[in-house]
Image (cartoon, grey):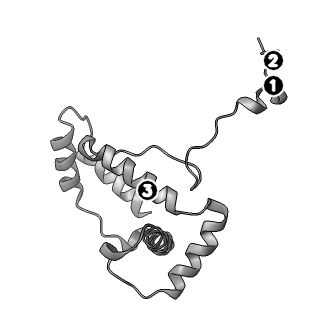
Amino acid sequence: MPNPKGHEDSIKDSRFKAAWQSGPTRTIRVPIALAEVTLDYARQLDKTIEPLDTANSIIGSEVESKQPQSRDTMTGAEEVAWLKAENRRLQNLVSDMRIELYHTSPSDIELPEAADLLNRLKAKRKKSTATLADIETILEMIEG
């Protein structure tokens, strides 16, 4: 049954106010021994960074104008800028690799022998009912 008081107007003032000024958050996994220190460091970084809408333009210009330096001597904002630039570089690299993989035909990939695959399968899944003929058929299907 729908909630009769569940209208947008009735919940407008009760919405959660974000505690972080850097924008949306996400859950991450860190070792228990480092959890408190990591959270403290994140809070310190969050205090030194401008709100998200203006931070991107400021950080982007900092990355382009500054010379590379040791990560040990960076301020919080500089480190965030460096990490964002590194993230962009890695995303471009992954994108290039995906394009290369897409254009690679199955005949360019060297597949293992059927007997080797069957042995590896039996080592991982001892009760597997696959036969050598099954593996050979699968390899033929992959090769096209």
Please state which of the two labelled residues, at mark 3 or mark 2, is closer to the viewer.
3
| Crowd tier of the residue under label 3, counting other residues whose Cα lies within 10 Å: few below 14, some 14–19, many 20 or above | few
Q: Secondary structure at mark 1?
A: helix
Q: 43 or 82: nearer the eye?
A: 43
Residue density around tag 1, few if under 14, some if 14–19, many if 20 or more, within 10 Å: few
Residue 35 quadrant: top left
- Identify residue type, mark 1: Ser
Report whether 6 appears left or right of 19.
Answer: right
Is 55 in front, or is 95?
A: 55
Compare residues 81 and 137 and report the one nearer the observer.
81
> Which kind of residue does numbered mark 2 sit on?
Lys
Left or right: 59 as drawn, with respect to 126: right
Q: Is residue 41 above or below residue 63?
A: above
Query: What residue does disc 1 label?
Result: 10
Image coordinates for residue 76, horizontal then vertical, percent:
43, 67
Which residue is situated farthest in the top direction here?
1
Does the residue at mark 2 contact the one at mark 1 (Cβ under 8 Å)? Answer: yes
The residue that appears at 35% across and 70% down in the rendered structure is 109
Which residue has dot 3 on it?
A: 44
Q: Is residue 117 left or right of residue 19?
A: left
Instruction: Specify which label sits upstream in the sequence, 1 or 3.
Output: 1
- Looking at the picture, how far across and down is residue 139, in whole percent? 34, 57
Sequence-wise, which precedes: disc 2 or disc 1? 2
Residue 134 in view here: no
Label 2: few (<14), some or many (≥20) within 10 Å? Answer: few
Residue depicted at x 31% and y 49%: 37
Label 2 to label 1: alpha-carbon separation: 7 Å
**Mark 2 or mark 3, which is nearer the start of the sequence?**
2
Q: Which residue is mark 2?
A: 5
